[in-house]
Image (spheres, helix red, strand yellow):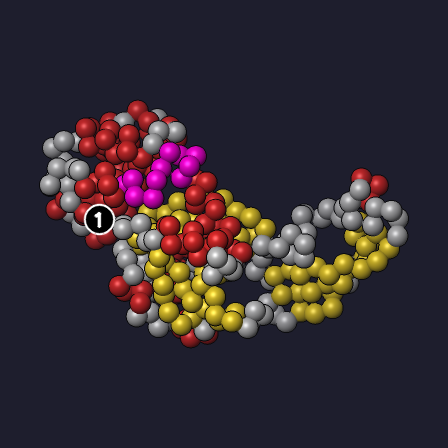
Amino acid sequence: MRSDYRGDRRKGEIELVEPRQVLDNGYYCVYDDKVAFPDGTEGSYVRIKGHKNKGVLIVPVTADGEYCLVSIFRHAAAEWLLEFPRGFVEHGEEFEAAARRELREELAAEAGNVRYLGWFYTDTAHMENEMHVFQADVAGSGGAQGATTAGQRLESIRRVACAGEEALQEMVAKSEIKDPYTISAFGKWLAFRAKNGLTGTDGVKTVEKMPAKLNSNVLPLLVAAIDRAAFRSGRSLPEILDAVVAAHPETGYADEAWNGLDEEAREAIIGKARKTLDVFQ
């Protein structure tokens, strides 16, 4: 429940009179609470609380603009469903770290740049659990197709599927994707892009127009710098990319494999871009 707030029937709310726990299976606690309704009558209301009541969901997108989903068997629905990767946040774990871990466990993929998109309640009628949503850049579907992690074996993950944005929208419209978490996260990502003036392949298209020496090795650097700039300035992704390239026409970063650099080296490179762009101030 939200802090210790119990609701107030005098304000038209459902008021908790007495919490009554009926089950604790080590993962969830189920309550059959005694409550008072706005008209003064009393009754019961089922409430579910997770021992780990925060989760992360990741929208994985490849450089080609494809979305990666997992096919997972859900016991309650008794069918295989296509979903974005998600999971619980361990106690003491940062949200982003949890998101990166879930990608490794379910897709056998390492996330490049990660964006936080916000959060939502998983089921406002019965649960207080929070789902925190991230979009992550991933290398592609090749490595993910062969994933056989322990997490997959325990969670009945059968395969990884990749779909373009139009195909994904059609799958949602035709109820081929039925998972509400996935649909909500997809909507959050579309809203984030619309707010920031981005399209699904803005980054890819703009990078293709850069000088030859700015090859794909520099993309993670640019995305990291661009995201910080776009978030703080409200400028579109192509505008920020153009500004970065204009600020560093002599750059030789293409010979440095970004993923092979340690954190200190990465921060040094990003710091150079930050100093030359007023949008970072």
| Residue 137 in view here | yes
Horizontal and vertical percent position of residue 276? 24, 27
Where residue 76 sits, quadrant-wise, is bottom right
Q: Is residue 100 left or right of residue 50?
A: left
Horizontal and vertical percent position of residue 107? 36, 63
Q: Nearer the viewer, residue 139 or 76?
A: 76
Residue corresponding to mark 1: 258
Q: Residue at x 42, y 37 (%)?
A: 194
Examine the structure image and report whether residue 132 is included in the region drawn in magenta. no
Q: Is residue 154 left or right of residue 222?
A: right
Q: Residue at x 62, y 65 (%)?
A: 28
Where residue 44 sits, quadrant-wise, is bottom right
Q: Which residues are magenta?
A: 193-203
Q: Residue at x 15, y 41 (%)?
A: 214
Location of the C terminus (image quadrant): top left
Q: Residue furthest top?
A: 278
Q: Nearer the viewer, residue 76 or 90?
A: 76
Examine the structure image and report whether residue 197 is included in the region drawn in magenta. yes
Q: Secondary structure at mark 1?
A: helix
257 shown above or below 214: below
116 shown above or below 111: above
